[in-house]
């Protein structure tokens, strides 16, 4: 299997694919959250956005991982990106309907369109992760993860900034039009990766349904039998599941900071600003010694930042708290990605990446639903404070039950 250097056209195309996909997701997240809160003024309705995506994602993720290991990766990625084009186009068309009709139909069509992105996302990350290891030497995985994380964070900064600016100066329809453009560009970028890189794996059990479930079970057994990988994934999942507050930002903007969509764009971009700075640093200075302790410390810092954000009543402190939380989260993301790449056998990368996606999907989309539900029951600010407290508890439990993670140096995995 051929490998390529960082400067190859294929690697640049892969990073472009990642950039356009995340831009599409981030812009959609901002405008959908703003539109739904304007229609409902209900924090729980914001949480239901995550639920609408996570249900189809969970239903398809393990099968998507199997398919990525067994079939042509680029074709599967193109199919997923085409679903993004369909999803963004549907949202654009709905936004162009008369306001009376939108008020009559409510949020159900929006949630239905978001469900399409759940099916798409089941394939997008496994495709990216499996193609990445074909383009990068094993000794460069840590730096490649840092570069990929920086591209991810760049899109997380640019996406909300674009969405907030267009919402402020333009319209919801204009923003959805931009998401269609980025979805189409993701198709183009993936198409530029040579098909030889995305060649399908050997199919020893093609057409055997029992073998499909057997292969999926093999991936699950690998992850749940690997203490370091499992504990790193679980740590991230529970910390963001309970400690994150991104889904509630439209409510904080409207009810706490008393501002408009430009502030929503700034707040959503703030974590990525910190994360990009840290990602660029880690690209040149990858973490090796005391990686486990640094990971545990980063998650603790993330929880502390969420506590400051919940208590803040002024914009500059809210932005600062979210920016620093992104700095800590970037450390967690890069370390988890590096552990994932170094620990996984080549023939299982699609399945293990899909399982990783289930953990991340749990933390992000289910976390959004949990945030909306908690805000409904406890109130907006108490729900975020409670989640930060749970994050500290998660770190304490991980420190106790995962000694191999606590003692981890990256060189132990190479």
Image (cartoon, helix red, strand yellow):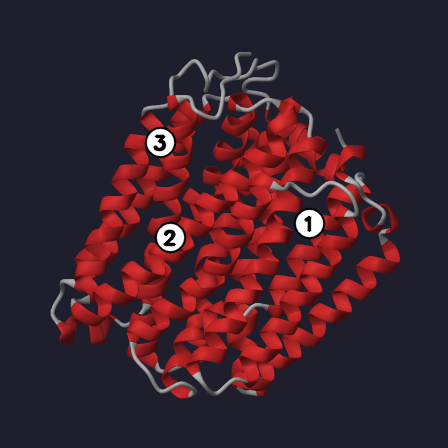
Q: Residue at x 73, y 54 (%)?
A: 294
Image position of 1 with respect to 24: above or below: above
Q: Nearer the viewer, residue 119 or 205?
A: 119
Q: Residue at x 41, y 40 (%)?
A: 18
Residue 58 visible at all: yes
Image position of 337 with respect to 402: above or below: above
**N-terminal of the two: label 2 or label 3?**
2
Residue 359 percent location from the top left of the image: 62, 51
Which numbered dot is residue 233? 1
Image position of 59 with respect to 306: above or below: above
Horizontally, residue 5 falls left or right of residue 161, namely: right
The quarter of the image holding the N terminus is: top right
Residue 266 percent location from the top left of the image: 37, 69
Which numbered dot is residue 78? 3
Horizontally, residue 14 falls left or right of residue 174, namely: right
Q: Nearer the viewer, residue 381 or 259?
A: 259
Residue 62 visible at all: no
Residue that numbered label 2 is attached to: 25
Residue 305 percent location from the top left of the image: 60, 72
The answer to which image quadrant residue 187 occupies is top left
Tell me how far mark 2 sits from mark 1, CA to CA.
Answer: 22 Å
Q: Residues within 10 Å of mark 1 (few under 14, many from 20)?
A: many
Tell me how far mark 1 sits from mark 3, CA to CA.
Answer: 27 Å
């Amino acid at each position: 299997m051929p490998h390529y250097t960082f400067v190859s056209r294929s690697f640049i195309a892969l990073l472009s694919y990642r950039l356009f996909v995340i831009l599409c997701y981030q812009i959609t997240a901002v405008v959908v959250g703003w539109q739904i809160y304007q229609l409902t003024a209900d924090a729980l309705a914001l949480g239901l956005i995550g639920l609408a995506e996570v249900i189809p994602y969970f239903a398809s993720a393990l099968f998507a991982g199997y398919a990525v290991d067994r079939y042509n990766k680029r074709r599967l990625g193109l199919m997923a990106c085409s679903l993004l084009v369909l999803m963004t186009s549907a949202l654009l068309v709905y936004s162009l309907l008369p306001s009376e009709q939108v008020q009559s139909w409510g949020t159900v069509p929006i949630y239905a369109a978001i469900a399409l992105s759940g099916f798409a996302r089941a394939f997008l990350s496994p495709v990216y992760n499996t193609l990445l290891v074909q383009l990068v030497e094993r000794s460069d995985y840590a730096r490649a993860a840092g570069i990929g994380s920086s591209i991810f964070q760049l899109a997380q900064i640019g996406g909300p900034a674009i969405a907030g600016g267009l919402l402020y100066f333009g319209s919801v329809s204009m923003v959805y039009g931009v998401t269609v453009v980025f979805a189409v560009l993701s198709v183009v970028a993936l198409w530029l990766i040579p098909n030889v890189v995305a060649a399908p794996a050997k199919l020893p059990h093609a057409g055997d349904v029992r073998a499909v479930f057997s292969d999926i079970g093999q991936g699950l057994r690998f992850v749940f039998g690997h203490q370091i990988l499992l504990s790193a994934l679980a740590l991230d999942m529970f910390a963001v599941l309970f400690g994150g507050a991104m889904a509630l930002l439209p409510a904080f903007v409207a009810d706490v900071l008393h501002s408009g969509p430009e502030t929503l764009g700034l707040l959503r971009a703030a974590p990525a600003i910190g994360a990009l700075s840290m990602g660029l640093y880690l690209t040149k200075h990858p973490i090796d010694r005391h990686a486990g302790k640094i990971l545990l410390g980063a998650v603790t810092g993330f929880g502390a930042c969420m506590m400051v954000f919940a208590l803040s009543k002024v914009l500059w402190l809210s932005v600062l708290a979210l920016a620093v939380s992104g700095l800590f989260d970037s450390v967690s993301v890069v370390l988890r990605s590096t552990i994932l790449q170094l620990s996984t056998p080549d023939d299982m990368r699609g399945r293990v990446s899909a399982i990783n996606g289930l953990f991340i999907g749990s933390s992000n989309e289910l976390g959004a639903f949990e945030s909306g539900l908690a805000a409904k029951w406890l109130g907006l600010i108490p729900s975020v404070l409670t989640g930060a407290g749970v994050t500290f508890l998660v770190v304490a439990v991980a420190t106790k039950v995962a000694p191999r993670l606590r003692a981890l140096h990256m060189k132990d995995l190479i």
